[in-house]
Amino acid sequence: MKKGEYLTTLLRAKQTVFSSREIMLLWQETNGNAAKVRINYYVRHGQLYRIRRGVYGKDTMYDRLECAVKIFTPSYVSFETLLTRAGVVFQQYGQIFAASYVNREIVTDGQTYQYKRLKDTILTNPLGIEQTGNYAIATAERAFLDVVYLNPEYHFDNLSSLNWDIIQDMLPIYGGNKRMERNIKKYHTLSKSNV
């Protein structure tokens, strides 16, 4: 790659957020130190925006949901972030919730990212996960199941928008958890009584 093409390659990419590893792949760079020097040069000159160590945006207007899945990989946007959008939970949350292999809260660039740990077999199962733009995001049904899996006594405000057939199809992902199956039946019954 020629000298002037490195930044152009990033700016032409569809992503708004890049990990150091993704930048090296786009640049076809095998020397990590050379890539680090080049990245730091672009950051110092305002041509790349450092969100946090190892994660960079094209500028300050990067997609926060895309950033959530770049900080820890594999991960996908889920839980209350999706349930609020779907109208299942009415409370608005300032943080972005994501499923990952770790439990962690990260605050960077004024945004709080809340990561909740799921077992690898659940986390890596693609059922109910959509690739939206440059990040993975759960459907409302998958986010609902993720919440029930981690918090069986959660209060949901409006269960009528969920597709219960899809929920039943996805339930086996959670490993035949009998407690969870009982809770899903309870929530399903509750959703019918509220209609």
Image (spheres, rainbow, N blue to C red):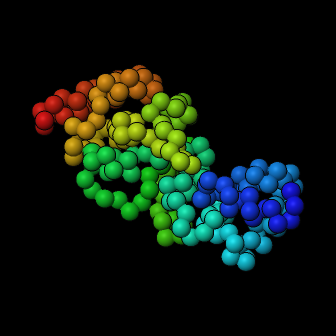
Q: In this image, 166 relative to 123: left or right? A: left
Residue 170 location (% of width, % of height): 40, 26
Give the residue drawn at x 39%, y 51%. Answer: 81
Residue 165 location (% of width, % of height): 31, 24
Q: Nearer the viewer, residue 107 or 134?
A: 134
Q: Is residue 128 above or below residue 56?
A: above
**Residue 149, picture quadrant:** top left
Residue 116 visible at all: no
Q: Nearer the viewer, residue 137 or 95?
A: 137
Q: In this image, 158 relative to 63: left or right? A: left
Q: Is residue 42 above or below residue 159?
A: below
Give the residue drawn at x 86%, y 56%. Answer: 1
Q: In this image, 39 relative to 88: left or right? A: right
Q: Nearer the viewer, residue 60 or 91?
A: 60
Residue 131 location (% of width, % of height): 52, 41
Which residue in the rendered view is the most extreme toward the bottom? 45
Give the residue drawn at x 73%, y 77%. Answer: 44
Residue 49 visible at all: yes
Q: In this image, 168 relative to 52: left or right? A: left
Give the residue drawn at x 50%, y 59%. Answer: 64
Q: How many marks?
A: 0
**Residue 156, picture quadrant:** top left
Q: Is residue 110 above or below residue 149?
A: below
Query: Which quadrant of the rendered structure holds the C terminus?
Result: top left
Residue 26 location (% of width, % of height): 75, 52
Q: Is residue 47 above or below residue 92?
A: below
